[in-house]
Amino acid sequence: MFKLNLFWIFILFFFVFPMFKQWNLERMRVATIRKLEKKRGSRVITLIHRQESVGFLGVFARNYINIEDSEEILRAIRMTSSDTPIDLIVHTPGGLLLAASQIAAALNKHEAKVTVFVPHYAMSGGTLIALAADEIVMDRHAVLGPVDPQIGQYPAVSILKTVEEKPVAEIDDETLIMADISRKAIEQTCKFVVSLLVDNVPREEAERLAGILTEGRWTHDYPISSE
């Protein structure tokens, strides 16, 4: 009997308690969001990817921007009336370019004011989404990052640089193909960034900023502060 009780205590501690903790955290988040919506008269949407302890033995779950995120956020934007401002809270290391682009495009087309809040960081795809806003509100220590495309595990700009510095005869077909993809990816991303910015700043300035963010001036994880 004593062993059986220990078994149920074990189940409760390692399975039920983490689930309850996560549920309670989500409940508090929703309550905070509702208060913010009431205060600002807006629709608050969150894109939060934190490394949180969940499940058995507190396994850490780390997320990135994916298609599921874009589906949920696009649905939330569609359900928001065109005259209701949107406040998007972004906390993410980045993720899938397609998903981030979908979210950014939808925000950019929303008629009412869109504000993106960055409490800590919005890197890569998170920055792309932030650029779609009418206003970006950042903590004094929060950062954005470059949006230069990544092809596999390598920066597209670095692939092109490698090809430029070697004779074509010494470059294998796969690398040449990657270079072609890299060139297209950089051009596409740069044009997309311009399209996000051009409604809020002059075209020349939009093109200049897009070039800075996509040209590989910094490493992909380089922090860009509000200063």
Image (cartoon, rainbow, N blue to C red):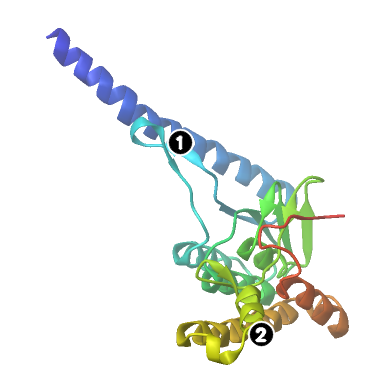
Q: In x, y percent, where is residue 121? A: 68, 51
Q: Amino acid at mark 2?
A: Glu
Q: Is residue 106 left or right of residue 118?
A: left
Quadrant, the N terminus: top left
- Rendered image quadrant of residue 132: bottom right
Q: In x, y percent, where is residue 204? A: 87, 84
Q: Which residue is mark 1?
A: 53
Residue in the image at 15% along x and 15% along y: 4
Q: Which residue is mark 2?
A: 164
Q: Nearer the viewer, residue 124 or 90?
A: 124
For the question of whether residue 45 can be seen, the reply is yes
- Rendered image quadrant of residue 83: bottom right
Q: Amino acid at mark 1?
A: Ser
- Rendered image quadrant of residue 109: bottom right
Q: Nearer the viewer, residue 40 or 161?
A: 161
In the rendered image of this protein, does residue 32 appear above or below residue 204?
A: above
Q: Is residue 141 left or right of residue 202?
A: left
Q: In x, y percent, where is residue 219? A: 69, 62
- Furthest toward the top, the residue is 2
- The local crowd at label 2, few if under 14, some if 14 to 19, many if 20 or more residues have their Cα within 10 Å, is few
Label 1: element kind: strand
- The local crowd at label 1, few if under 14, some if 14 to 19, many if 20 or more residues have their Cα within 10 Å, is some
Label 2: element kind: helix
In the rendered image of this protein, does residue 116 appear above or below residue 111?
A: above
Number of marks in picture: 2
